[in-house]
Image (cartoon, helix red, strand yellow):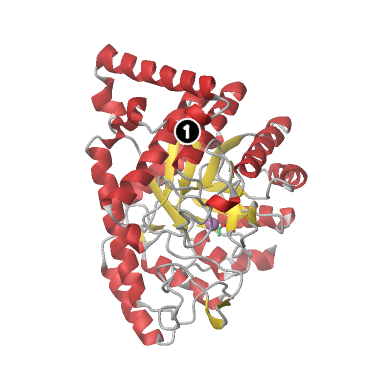
Amino acid sequence: MAAMSKQWAQWQPNSWRSKPIKQQPQYEDMGQLDKVLGRIKSYPPLVFAGEVDNLKRQLAGAAAGKRFLLQGGDCAERFQDCNPESITSKLKILLQMSVVLCYGARRPVVRVGRIAGQYAKPRSSDMEDIQGQKMPVFRGDNINSFEPDAEGRRANPERLLHGYHTASMTLNYIRALITGGFADLHHPENWNLGFVGKSEHRSKYERVVANIRDAVTFMETFGGVREESLGSVDFFTSHEGLLLGFEEAMTRFFPEKSRYYNLGAHMLWIGDRTREISGAHVEYFRGIENPIGIKWGPSADPQEMTELIKALNPSNEPGRITIISRFGHEKVESHLPIAVEAVRKGNCNVLWSSDPMHGNVIKAGNNIKTRDFDSILSELRSSFRVHAELGSRLGGVHFELTGENVTECIGGSEAIKESDLVRQYETFCDPRLNYSQSLEMAFVISEILAQNA
Ligand code: PEP
Ligand code: CO
C-alpha cells in the first residue's frame, strides 16, 4: 500500500506519458502531432467547470435514488453528422426518452449524450483485411478515415483539429436548440409513435403518452411552467477518454478551485479495454475533476475494480464514479452480483448504470454485426432485478442509439430481421437502436421504474 501511494504522488496533465498505454494510433510525424495539440490547447474550452460540477451533483443525486441517468448516442460519432438534421434527431430522441423515463421513475432524468466528441474508438486488432487487402483498422474520425483505402486509414493528426471544431459546432447547436425552446418536444403530439401501433403493448404505451400529454398540459395551464422549466433542460456531453494527447490538450487548470478539469466534455468514461490500474488512462483520469464512467465487463477482476474505483476517487466523493456494467444478457446474472458485492465491501460510493449494448454484439448470418432488441432488454431486466435483490440500485442506463430509422439492431416492434440489416446500416462501428427501438426501450424501462418506485 505504501508503495502504491508513492506511485500516485505526482499528477500532471501529462504524467500519463510515462505509463504503459493501449489503443493509441501510430502517428508517423510526431512533430506534426505536437503542433496540432499545441493549437488545440490554445483554443477555448467546450464546456465550463461549473457545468461539470453541476453534472457531478446530479449524478450524486442519481446514486442516491433522487434522479435517473440516461446516457446515449452513437458508438462512433461521425464528422459528417455535424449537420442540423442529425444533431436535431439525436437530441430529440434523447429528450423524448428522458420524458418517458421521468414519467415512470417519478424522478428527474440526467441527460448525457455520447455526443460532441465521441470520435475515438478502441479496436480489437490493429489491422483488418478488406477484400484481400491488409490495412489499419478505423479508429474513429479523430484518427483516420472510415474509407477503406491505405491513405485514408493513415493516422492523421490534422483530423484532431477537425474533431475539435466539429465537437464545438455540434455543442453550439445543441445549446442553441435547448435555449431556443426545442425542449417543447415534451409534447407527445410531436413524436413519431407509429411503432406503438405495431406493438403488442399498444394500449399500455398509448396510456403513458396520454398521461404525459395531460401532465404537460396541466403544468402549462396551471402557471406558465413551460417557460421556466419545460422549455429549458440540462443536457450534458460525454465521450470515451481514449486519445490521451487530445484529452491532455483539453485539460485546463481552474484557478478558483485549484483543480484540473477536462473541458472537452462534461463526463468522460474509461473503456473496458483501457482500465488497467497501472496504465496511462487511469493515470490521466485520476487527476481531472470531471465525473468519470468506468466500463465493467466480464473479464474484469472485482477486487481490482474496487482498487481502481478507490484510486480514481480516494475521497469517495458522490457523483464522481459511475460504474457502467456491460456483461451481456447471458453473463449478467452471474457477474453483476459479484460486482455489486465487491463495491459494497469496498464501501465505494458509486452510481450504477447498465450498458446492455456492448455485451450483446452478435454476427448476423450475413456476417453483419448486430444486436438483438430482446437480448438488450433481457440484460436490462436482469440488471434491475439483481440490484433490487441485493438492496442496491440501478440508477442509470447507457445506450448506443440514433434518432434515424436505421436498421442496425434486430427486433423491436417493427420486427427488424437479419435480412433487413442491409437496408439502412450506417454505423461506423457498433450497431445502434433506431428511433422506434429507442423510444420503445424507454417505455419498457419506464414501466420497470414505475414498478420499483
Ligand atoms: C463503447 O462504449 O463504445 C465501447 C467501446 O465500450 P466498452 O469499452 O464497454 O467495450
Ligand atoms: Co460501441
Of the pair 252 and 293, the residue shown nearer to us: 293
Which quadrant of the view contains residue 188? top left
**Closer to the camera in the image, 18 or 39:** 39
Residue under pointer 1? 195
Which residue is rendered at x = 32% and y = 65% of the image? 164
Q: Position of residue 51 (x, y in %)?
A: 35, 46
Name the residue located 52 percent from the left edge and 26 percent from the top edge: 105
Residue 138 versus residue 297 in the image, above or below:
below
Relative to 248, 353 lies left or right: right
Q: Given the image, on which type of amino acid does mark 1 rest?
A: Phe
The x and y percentages for residue 393 are 63, 34
Query: Image check: 61 left or right of 377?
Result: left
Is the residue marked 1 within 8 Å of ligand 2, measured from its CB? no
Residue 324 % position (x, y) = 59, 48
Whether residue 330 is visible to the viewer of this picture, yes or no, is yes
Q: Residues within 10 Å of mark 1 (few under 14, many from 20)?
A: some
Residue 358 location (% of width, % of height)? 60, 53
Which quarter of the rendered image does ligand 1 occupy? Answer: bottom right
